[in-house]
Image (cartoon, coloured by chain):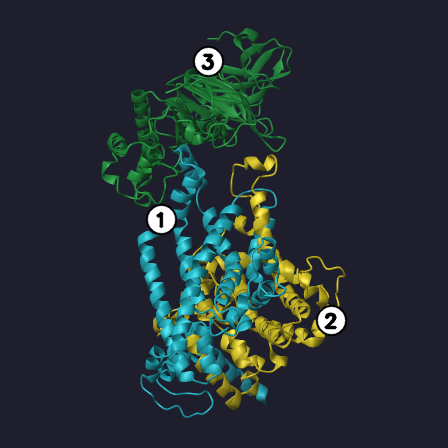
Amino acid sequence: MAVAAAPSSSRAGRRLVGRVARSEGATGWLFASPAAILIAIFGLLPIAWSLLLSFQKADLLTPDTPWVGTANYRQMANDPLFAGAIQHTIVYTSLFVPGTIVVGFLIAVALNRKIRGISIYRTAAYVTMAVSSISAAIVFLWLFDPVYGVVNYGLSLLHLPQQPFMSDPSQALFVIVLMTVWGWTGFAVVIYLAALQGIPQDVLDAAAIDGASRFTVLRTIVVPLLSPATLFLVVWLTINALQLFDEVYLSTRGGPLYSTSVVVYYLWDQAFRQFNAGYAAAMAYALFLVIALVTAIQFWLGEKFVHYSS
Amino acid sequence: MAQVELRNVTRRYGSDVFALRDLNLDVADGEFIILVGPSGCGKSTALRLLAGLDKPTSGDILIGGQVVNSMLPGERDIAMVFQNYALYPHMSVYRNLAYGLKQRKTPKHEVDERVRRTSTMLGLESLLERKPAQLSGGQRQRVAMGRALVREPRVFLLDEPLSNLDAKLRSEVRGELKRLHHRLGITTIYVTHDQVEAMTLGDRICVMSEGTLQQLGTPQEIYESPANVFVAGFMGSPAMNLARVPLVAGQVLWGGLPVAHVELGLDEVVVGVRPESFRVVGADEPAAVATVDFVEPLGSHNLVHVRMEASGAPSPAGAPSPQTAELVVAQVPTHERPTPGSRIRLGIDPMDVYLFHPASGVALTEVQLSPIARIS
Amino acid sequence: MTVHTVVTVPDDVVSGTSTSNPVPDARRSRAPSPWHLVLIPITFVLLVPLLWMLITSLETPDEAAQFPPTLVPHDIRWANYPDALNAAPFGQFFLNSAIVAVVVVLSNVVLCSLAGYAFARLQFPGKSLLFASLMVTLMVPFQVTMIPEFLIVKWLGIHVASGVGIDHLGALIVPNLVTAFGIFFLRQFFRTIPVELEEAARIDGTSRIGVLFKIVLPLSLPALSTLAALTFLDSWNNFLWPLIVIDSQSNMTLPLGLTFFQSAHATQWTLLMAGNVMSLLPMLVIFFAAQRYFVRSVAATGLKG
């Protein structure tokens, strides 16, 4: 009977399991391998493959991907649309990052007090975090509608001329800046509010006793003590700004006249619309290097200007 | 330098939470005054009101004879040392010291000169370029002091400035504070919950509890004639033994020993005896009899924790029931080292016995009672 | 690319109630603070986009197509909502988003816990090299990996199982079952748990897996809920990857479905806003219910969907 045979084999099995379980090395691999295999397939392999693709001509359809050397990289230097995308990305980033930081800082300072109803105000500021980039873009498109939009209505109340907004190549990018600043305000407020609460009250009291006005306290004590939060926001918002895509896709598809075509939008278009996957991979690597470089520079500057407590 | 006055100062939160109730206090020019009490007694509130970090609900605050109620902290010409020092963490020691002077538009060379002078006085010369995070606790404390001193304010406010130092450093800085005050003569208001600091530093001590002033007096007065049960119990270490004792025909019997006579028509009184007032006596002397619970040897003397036997004669069985036994601490010389469980006879000089009203807790003065002559 | 920061968030930031300051604020007991005059306009400006979305979703198409705009609708037109549902399967989009998010959250919590614990506490050959190579993926932006990921998913769909291939929900789930960020985040947290607790349990004869499930994970609930909240937000709001791999409407998640709906009904603003309200509502409900977790999580790690 199977029953009779079972004990000896199951005892051996238990011993084997016991020995494996006792060996820390095996347990470690056992625990780590599911995650490691998945990340190897969907994280590490694509990193290498992408590098390979950047030296190939690939269209995502045919399995044949001929080697083209550095042609894709050389093409970037001679592509006016790519140059435009870089320029738009730089303009966007240099407006979005400081804009979000200033708005977030001012609102956080206003919210950093204990008055009745403050939790309602805070929730209202945080709620933008729950709104997806797509939802926000749709709403802003409507707010800035050139014909029926409330923003134009507001301008008319102020006796200012109506604006075309999204349909004007010189304005569309700025509307995208506004919608993304709005979307990231809650995030910046949370970061700054947490940092503000970390400033000891007695340090502010000491400055008041030393005769500093409220504004001087803000300038000479609060702002320097918030510098780690500011550095974090600068780095984090910059990384996200350089990867802007969702809002552009939804609201303008890069137009009008390529005026909102930013790097990632152009890259996606090249890869999945024009099927120039090799070229897109090269651009992605270039973006990666730029992000790494910018982040490194920001941290390096941060070392000089940021005050870290303890 | 200036005198400081609080007139009927009350600080109320909401409609019924009193942080400070009708406080009156006169601090003479150059005086060193201590506000002492347990946490929540209102001492820190009083200091914050003086500094202008909080506003009184009613009453007036005067500095140098001038009402400062509506003046900002920076306009009051006061300086404050905070419990956690509150150094500007992103500034060097030099800039910490100079900050207040710069806010007052002091000329640059004068700022420099004063910072150098103050740092020399406090031994901070070699630390001027460091940030607070690079300093030890004691050094930070000095910088906090220096930041207050460098301004040469009219009034010096200190909020538990020694509480973050270890015991040895604390007594060092205590001595230094005393010397500095002697030398500079700045009116100083010092908040602490530590009675040793209160006794050693203050010209006068202001004992507070639950937002009200309990007693104001010199350290000697506070120790020798506490105004009420709270002051008696709070000042002195170890604390005064306090017990509710029923009166039998006006006789105050404690542990079987008559210690006082009260003719006020009361049923009971609160009796207080400081641990250091006990003497261990022989069988031939009148004494309160107690059972030794345990002994804490402290080197210079021993603290004997005993259970007082119920009022009246010791019970024949010798074992007092726990309900009636009171725990009492007696300070005795080191050679007295009774074993736990043994009986001990404690003599008390009636002159060292404090009596308090059982309801109000107010001290019964000598006028109101007649101490029994010591029976020898 | 992820930047890690340690921001401790006082409860105060989360709830807005005063607990930390021992000295109650003077203004509390007195007349309303003048700061309300600053905060009310700020709040209004921040909420205008959402309010305007709601108002438009209740207007008639004629009211919406007017200038000056109708600020208060004359008749509240609820019919925009059923109309929007008829025009696009928002229920399906929602279901797809929910399936993807729930599976991804659960698998991240389990797999990142196992791997995070291994990297935090166990010694095994190749550990540091493995950890370092996993962390490399944290540095690289998604744009670098998305093209090969597309090709891998396509290959898997043809050669392994069609359910994980292009235009299937599996394609949204499988590549996100585990993240290097989650492993790193939990590893850091596990290292703060006193090792003595684990040693005591092991001396009592508990196995490694028992220690993880009976000691470590119960103590890590704050970190696990933070990871869950972040993973959920990320998955729920993800747009670029679904855009690349999903084509048919029946497999779209909410952001993608909304985009599809927007391009099909670009001038029907009342329907568009009704659809937008419906796609936002579940997230808003979850956000209000778990505001504490979201705020803490976002501040703690600096991730945003």
Name which quarter of the figure residue B149 lies in.
top left
Single out the mark in the foreground, 2 or 3. 2
Q: Indicate the colour of chain A.
A: cyan
- Within 10 angstroms of label 3, few (less than 14), some, or many (20 or more) residues? few
Single out the mark in the foreground, 1 or 2. 2
List the residue tagged with mark 3. Answer: B284
**Labels 1, 2: one chain:** no
Structural distance between the alpha carbons of marks 1 and 2: 58 Å
Q: Amino acid at mark 1?
A: Ser
Across and down, in percent, residue B240 comes to 48, 23
**Labels 2, 3: one chain:** no
Q: Are marks 2 and 3 in contact (CB under 8 Å)?
A: no
Specify the chain shown as green. B
Single out the mark in the foreground, 1 or 3. 1
Structural distance between the alpha carbons of marks 2 and 3: 104 Å
Q: Amino acid at mark 2?
A: Pro
List the residue tagged with mark 2. Answer: C82
Q: Tell me which chain the residue with mark 1 is part of.
A: A
On screen, residue B2 above or below A194: above
Query: Which residue is depicted at the point 75% across and 68% down?
Result: C79
> Is residue A16 something that shows in the picture?
no
Name which quarter of the figure residue B114 lies in.
top left
Q: Are marks 1 and 3 in contact (CB under 8 Å)?
A: no
Query: Which residue is depicted at the point 49% across and 53% down?
Result: A103
Across and down, in percent, residue A223 comes to 41, 47
